[in-house]
Amino acid sequence: MNYLINILPMAAMLAAETTDPKGMAALAAGIAIGIAACGAGLGMGIAAGKAVEAGARQPEIFGKIQALLLTAIVFIESLGIYALVVALLLIFAV
């Protein structure tokens, strides 16, 4: 156990000296776009599922539900695009 306690600060110091900022920016960009894509996909799936459920319950207002769904999907997709812009800024700013 003492060996691990003594080696961890040295390993952290070595990692800090050899870390490439461009590589870390690329890693951060990948994580950012991955989380945003998962969130946007999950949000779109939930919105579409609820819209289909609402259309099945009241088919006469499905046109209004469809318009609201498309508006919601546009806003959800814009969040994914914002994450893409941030990822590109991370990659090319460093």
Image (cartoon, rainbow, N blue to C red):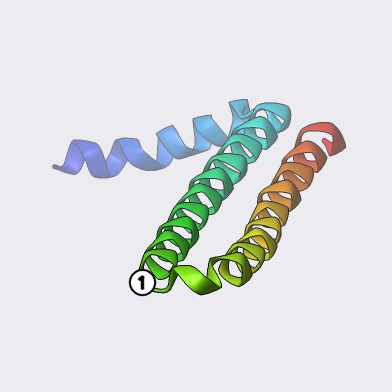
Residue carrying label 1: 57
Name the one closer to the observer, 26 or 76: 76
Name the one closer to the observer, 41 or 71: 71
Q: Residue at x 60, y 35 (%)?
A: 30
**Within the image, what quadrant is residue 56 found in?**
bottom left
Name the one closer to the observer, 58 or 68: 58
> Callout 1: helix, strand or loop?
helix
Could you tell me residue 26's position as x and y percent? 66, 31
Could you tell me residue 7's position as x and y percent? 32, 35
Query: Measured along the vertical axis of the image, is residue 37 above or below residue 60?
Result: above
> How many numbered discs sit on the rendered protein?
1
Could you tell me residue 3's position as x and y percent? 20, 36
Query: Measured along the vertical axis of the image, is residue 83 above or below residue 31?
Result: below
**Amino acid of disc 1:** Arg
Left or right placement of residue 88 versus residue 42 in this view:
right
Q: Residue furthest front?
A: 60
Please identify the quadrant where the N terminus is shown.
top left
Could you tell me residue 77's position as x and y percent? 67, 52
Query: Measured along the vertical axis of the image, is residue 66 above or below residue 28?
Result: below
**Within the image, what quadrant is residue 9 found in?**
top left
Q: Residue furthest right?
A: 93
Left or right placement of residue 74 versus residue 41 in this view:
right
Q: Residue at x 51, y 37 (%)?
A: 13
Q: Residue at x 63, y 65 (%)?
A: 72
Left or right placement of residue 23 versus residue 6 in this view:
right
